[in-house]
Amino acid sequence: MILGGLDVFIVILVLLAILTVFLGVKTVPQGFEWTVERFGRYTRRLDPGLNLIVPFVDRIGRKINVMEQVIDIPQQEVITKDNASVTVDGVAFFQVVDAVKASYEVAQLDLAIIKLTMTNIRSVMGSMDLDQMLSHRDEINVRLLRVVDAAVSAWGIKVNRIEIKDIYPPADLVNAMGRQMKAEREKRAEILTAEGQRQSDILRAEGAKQSQILEAEGRREAAFRDAEARERSAQAEAKATEMVSEAVARGDVAALNYFIAEKYLKAFAELARSPNQKVLMLPIEVTGVLGSLAGIAEIAKATFEDRATAARPAGRAPTGPSVPPPQPAR
């Protein structure tokens, strides 16, 4: 079947209509923004959803991802302030906030962000000592984020985070740091041991002090008790001496003999109890001692007879066996 000229025209017209619809209707996915160029010049931006452009005149320029993206920062050598060489890598998180600037203000956006971040890592970390670098990662991240974000803002980019992943010091530095850490721990252990010993000595000294105080107070109390006992003994001695003096004044010689005999015997008892005394020499007369003892017996006898007389009822003769008078001799 041979088509006529009209049929060919209709077919061409239908194909052209289909092509026109295809070129004029654009669907932008969520998370992306497209730019429209007319004869190579930017005209407008297409948001996510269904959009219409002028076919055969307008075309899609750049397709920009506006979601947050992550870029790995490759490893690089960094020389610290104290001339230590370390290997550092990291990761950066960024997001396109202006698709037009990100499309036409910079070429190779990812590469530009990587190179800029690496340069600032060398600048920031190179101004720090190794110990400070290893212990202040948060400070490094904050400084990097502030510098890089300010630099890429002209490109329509917002850097949300920059994180240092790993820091690799040389092997000899790692060994030296291990020895230093071990020495620091041993130092702290010795300090704690010395502190414990000092506290122990202080507590023992306090205990000894309290013990001596209590012992001194005990000795003071015992001395006070001894003094009080001696005072009472002296008072009793004085009272006894006074009573003997009164008895002598009344003419009672027996009381004086008793007092002297008592002192006499106590003196011999003290000599006998002496631990160094092996042989006791008595340069005295036995009759004198016996006489003193006889005096003591008479005093005791008189005392007992007086008590018996006072206890006997009045007008009653003493009971006992009657002794017949002696018979005269023939």
Image (cartoon, rainbow, N blue to C red):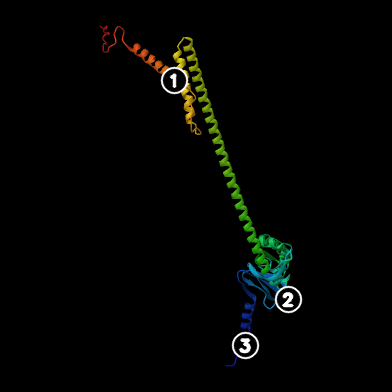
Residue 91, visible in the rendered structure: no
Q: Residue furthest front?
A: 330
Along the line of sight, which residue is nearer the eye, 148 or 139? 139
| Secondary structure of the residue carrying numbered label 2 | loop
Q: Residues within 10 Å of mark 1 (few under 14, many from 20)?
A: few
Along the line of sight, which residue is nearer the eye, 155 or 19? 155
Name which residue type carries label 2. Answer: Gly
Q: Name the residue under label 2.
A: 40
Q: In which quarter of the image is the C terminus?
A: top left
Mark 1 or 2, which is nearer the eye? Answer: 1
User: What residue appears at the point 48 percent right and 12 percent down from the top-left corner?
Assistant: 248
- The first of marks 2 and 3 along the sequence is 3
Q: Where is residue 3 in the image (x, y as percent from the top left)?
A: 60, 91
Along the line of sight, which residue is nearer the eye, 35 or 327? 327
Q: Name the residue under label 1.
A: 287
Q: Mark 3 points at which residue?
A: 8
| Secondary structure of the residue carrying numbered label 3 | helix
Q: Report if the CB atoms under discs 1 and 3 are less than 8 Å apart.
A: no
Q: Where is residue 213 in the image (x, y as percent from the top left)?
A: 56, 36
Mark 1 or 3, which is nearer the eye? Answer: 1
- Residue 133 found in image quarter: bottom right
| Left or right position of 248 against 63 | left
Q: Position of residue 110 (x, y in %)?
A: 68, 71
Give the spatial CA distance, label 1 vs label 2.
Answer: 160 Å
Q: Quadrant of the N terminus?
A: bottom right
Q: Where is residue 327 in the image (x, y as percent from the top left)?
A: 26, 7
Q: Which residue lies furthest to the bottom in this view?
A: 1
| Secondary structure of the residue carrying numbered label 1 | helix
| Left or right position of 41 against 178 | right
